[in-house]
Image (spheres, helix red, strand yellow):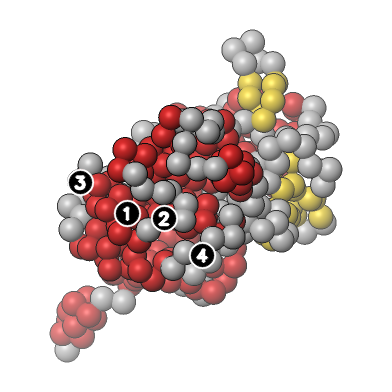
Amino acid sequence: MNTLALQNDGPYNLLAEHEVEEVRELLRGARADSTRRLYGRCFAAFMEWCAPRGARPMPAEPQHVKAYLASLKRRGLAPSTINTHLAAIVHAHRHAGVGFDTSLYEGVMDGVRRLNKRKPRKAKAATREVLDATLPEFGDDLRGLRDRAIILLGFWAARRRSELAGLDVTSALTDGAAGHVEFVKEGLVIRLNVSKTNQEGGEESYAVPYGCEPCAVEAVQAWMQAAGIAEGALFRQINRHGKVGGRISGHSINAIVKARLGDDFSGHALRRGFLVDAANNGLDVLALARQSGHASVNMVREYVKEAELFKVNPAALLAGKRGRG
């Protein structure tokens, strides 16, 4: 159910009319569109769970929230999904001005993670080696130019698919925009107003210089020139007749990556590929975090650890010493 269309009847009759409106309003703002929709669905699910149990979804009693999280675990949902449901409940309370102590749920979430039988999925990395092998097959038609620009910009800027989809070509942002690109003499700057780790609207800037081969800046310029794009969305839909349409979606970018690079890859593969390549080349963790926009360097260290499995390997060092002896 779309929480933005809440009605004060059925399972929602436990809420006063003004509370329904508060929930409706808080789920309209303060988050990126995709996050808002996700939180809306999650909070609606919590409200529906509360209704037959006579539990108020807001302010929620800790025992009810814990029982709800346990019910999600019984359904076999992944820890990350259960955590998203909890985040949606927290978000709804805080933006309605209702206190919510997250520390009360740390034990429950620790238990969810420990009992998880699923192996965390990692996106296959679209490294330079992968790109060099596939880019020559793209062709020079509109689709080829667009897809090359998406993949190269996603790689060199280490951006998420939603951020790529949300780029405009000028600072006069249009509907659905998360930021824009700006061409400078050194290359291209992505200026994001909203991202996964920045929901408050403060501008973040990420640079992609000329000279990174294959060149993302030149690929973006070639796409814009061929498609005649001077304003509005940077990456657009293309219909079967070759006509350029409106803004592309993050889901479409995911499909493009799979179609061009293979089913083993996803939209996240570009970002992961850049970080893996950079880590393999010994780049500093803090520098990587600045380019990728990760809120925590600990996430970036995971890529570095993976890259160093064989580079800084005690077994290899010991074997090398004995061989020299």
Specify few, some or many for label 1: CA neighbours under 10 Å numbering under 14, 14-19, or 20 or more: some
Residue 116 picture location, percent across and down: 20, 55
Mark 2 lies on residue: 60
Residue at the image position 83 percent from the left and 34 percent from the top = 230
Q: Which type of secondary structure does the marked residue at label 1 adopt?
A: helix
Q: CA distance from mark 4 to mark 2?
A: 10 Å
Q: CA distance from mark 3 to mark 2?
A: 21 Å
Q: Which type of secondary structure does the marked residue at label 2 adopt?
A: loop
Residue 157 picture location, percent across and down: 60, 54
In the rendered view, would you say 324 is above or below 64?
below
- Observer-nearest of 68 and 88: 68
Residue 221 seen in the current view: no
Q: Tell me the tag on residue 99.
A: 4
Residue at the image position 71 percent from the left and 61 percent from the top = 202
Residue 108 picture location, percent across and down: 27, 63
Q: CA distance from mark 3 to mark 1?
A: 15 Å
Residue at the image position 48 percent from the left and 71 percent from the top = 297
Q: Which amino acid type is shown beneath numbered disc 2?
A: Ala
Residues at discs 1 and 2 in contact (Cβ within 8 Å): yes
Q: Of callouts 4 and 2, which one flags the residue occurring earlier in the amino acid sequence?
A: 2
Q: Tell me the tag on residue 35.
A: none
Q: Which amino acid type is shown beneath numbered disc 4?
A: Gly
Mark 1 lies on residue: 64
In the rendered view, would you say 51 is above or below 94?
above
Q: Tell me the tag on residue 74.
A: 3
Q: Of callouts 3 and 1, which one flags the residue occurring earlier in the amino acid sequence?
A: 1
Quarter holding residue 221: top right
Q: Of callouts 4 and 1, which one flags the residue occurring earlier in the amino acid sequence?
A: 1
